[in-house]
Image: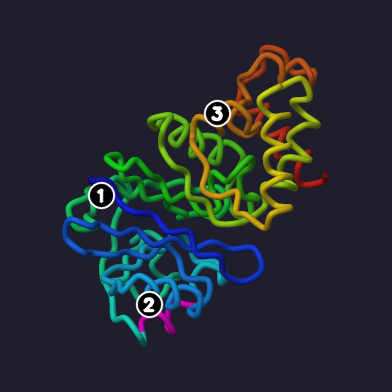
Amino acid sequence: MPLEIVTVPCLSDNYAFLAHDAATGITALVDAPEPEPILAALKARGWTLDMVLITHHHYDHVDGLAGVLEAHPATVVGNAADAERLPPLDLALSDGDTLQIGSQRGTMIDVSGHTIGHVAFVFPDTPVAFTADSLMALGCGRLFEGTPAQMWASLSKLAALAPDTLICSGHEYTASNGRFAITVDPDNTALQARIADIARARAANEATVPSLLSLELATNPFLRAADPAIQAHLGMEGADPADVFAEIRQRKDTF
């Protein structure tokens, strides 16, 4: 039985996620921007929190942790390589290590770029990937610490997952990401349709996160740096995709 995923809006544009294994009753939280919405979501479902998975150290992903743990003491899991910048970890994992949410086995993978030591948690049997600010809906995180080559390598790892993987990313940036994406991939009809769908969803105050990896592969320019149409539009035909990615990221930074 796959994990039940609940998207929890937090702050002005953040998302946390609850992952519940019905077979065992075990529930995990991914990131903790603020406590109140998370605690309300747990209470509404009668769930007790057992585990918190931390993707990276930025305040808008960890500042709510203390308040959550006051109400629900839980095992805090994160990247051993970045432990000095994270809240205290009960379970410090390394790249490629496995973990369990009840009966569901997952893997923590390094997806450095937005920060050094940013991780994603992938559960292939659901299938779901909690990617926070690495791969995002129609975008990717700004490179605060890593290099374009690092982020391209990280995104390539995520792009290789099963196409039906649900991508649970950390922010409601999809509309603005779409406005940029069409500037580098203007003839992509799938992207045009997605932008229209996003506009309808946001007009109804509906979340555009999570999204399917198959949709990201078809429309997200940060995954499509090898696409000949994008390369041609950028005047970079035949270039190394990592260099094309770097150009796309630089353009987004100044968009």
Q: Which colour scheme is used?
A: rainbow
Q: Position of residue 150 (x, y in %)?
A: 53, 40
Q: Position of residue 119 (x, y in %)?
A: 42, 52
Q: Residue beneath label 3, please? A: 217
Element on which disc 1 rests: loop
The quadrant the C terminus occupies is top right
Q: Does label 1 or label 2 sit earlier along the sequence? A: 2
Q: In this view, does 234 lie above or below 125?
A: above
Which residue range is magenta in the image? 64-69
Magenta segment main secondary structure: helix
Q: How far apart are marks 1 and 3 (CA)?
A: 26 Å
Q: Residues within 10 Å of mark 3 (few under 14, many from 20)?
A: some
Q: Distance between the residues labelled 1 and 2?
A: 31 Å
At 69% from the left and 30% from the top, the residue drawn is 193
Q: Residue beneath label 1, please? A: 97
Q: Where is residue 229 in the image (x, y as percent from the top left)?
A: 71, 16
Q: Residue beneath label 2, please? A: 43
